Amino acid sequence: MPYNIDIALLRAFLAVVDTGGMTSSAKVLNLTQAAVSQQVKRLEDSFGCALFERDRKGLKLTPTGERLVVQARRLVRNNDEVWSAMNEAEFEGEIRLGIPSDFVRCFGAPILKQFDQAWPRVRVSLICDTTQRLLEKLDGGEVDLTFAVEKKCGHNGETLLSDPLVWVGAKGGQAYERDPLPISTDDETCMLRPFALKALADQGRVWRWVCEDSNFDPILATLDADIAVAPLLASTVPPGFEILGERHGLPSLPSFWINLYQPHAGPTRLSQELALHIRDVVGARSQVLA
């Protein structure tokens, strides 16, 4: 049998907690003291326990009342968020999201699905490119917000995740054993590429290009065929590939920040809403990787 909690009773309870008494909470709630006392009594009756006890200093929470405080605040907050969402005007329009091509599978798909369910009348356009060009497009007004992969975060950016750069190859593959080492990377504007090449140079490892492309799929194709290895962010490695390391004779690589940027002039309401979903998806992904 389901039990329903009256949000108004929780509000009265929290008002007494926050103000320290029935009289002071009555002023906040614009009720009489008797009405507040009655609401608290109804809440206690519904739970079958006392939430307050009196001492010489006034009202004091019982252990059960202390346990309820956090849950009550959460329920009231969720109630208000739902009410606000259902009574706001529905958004319409289009928003342009800048995203590197290697992020599309791991981040783009769940973000688009979640946002579309919340705002079905808003059209999201993906602009895929490297971090350098995406930040230029943001400054030029060609995208409304964008992901960026960097070694640090700019003053108007927001760090979403710290992500290690790793070597990746075919599962059970042998491309990493070849000499010179066959590698596939993004093009010359890629933020990750110089660090991977420096690591190989520091190791004294000779290498050769197999693929230089800002599109993620050709890079994955060379890995799948076991004709190359590639430096990829750990969060972007698709299932079915193997992360390689020092045991395979490859040098260690640094970590990078995955940042989110919105225009210097300030975000729009639509971009703020999309940013909420981005934080949610990336946060869930980071817990999986941890």
Image (cartoon, rainbow, N blue to C red):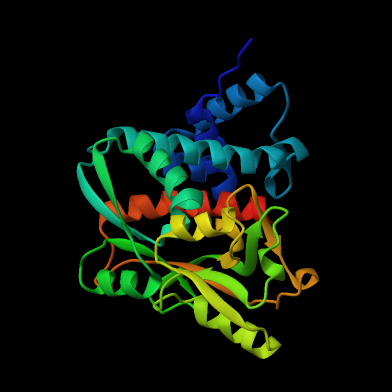
Task: Name, please, the residue furthest toward the front.
Answer: 179
Q: Quadrant of the N terminus?
A: top right
Which residue is drawn at the image coordinates 65% and 76% (left, top)? 253
**With respect to residue 54, does 224 lie above or below?**
below
Residue most extreme to the right: 247
Depth check, front residue: 85 or 47: 85
Q: Is residue 91 above or below residue 286?
A: above
Instruction: Estimate the x, y position of residue 217 in percent, counting from the top left.
Output: 45, 55
Q: Compared to 118, does 283 lie above or below?
A: below
Q: Is residue 240 visible?
A: yes
Q: How many marks?
A: 0
Residue 254, picture quadrant: bottom right
In the image, taking residue 177 as reference, residue 40 lies left or right, namely left
- Seen from the viewer's position, the closer of residues 130 and 11 is 130
Give the left or right position of residue 94, taking residue 179 as reference. left
Residue that lies at the very extreme toward the top in this rendered image: 1
**The one of 80 and 274 positioned closer to us in this rendering:** 274
Instruction: Measuring from the top left, give residue 265's x and y in whole percent.
Output: 24, 71
Camera sees residue 196 = no
Which residue is at 54% across, 36% downward? Answer: 75
Among the 4 quarters of the image, the one containing residue 65: top right
Residue located at (28% from left, 75% from top): 136
- Residue 262 lies in what quarter of the image? bottom left
Expressed as whole percent of the image width and height from the top left, the position of residue 112 reads: 38, 44
Q: The C terminus appears in which quarter of the rendering?
A: bottom right
Residue 279 to residue 42: above or below: below
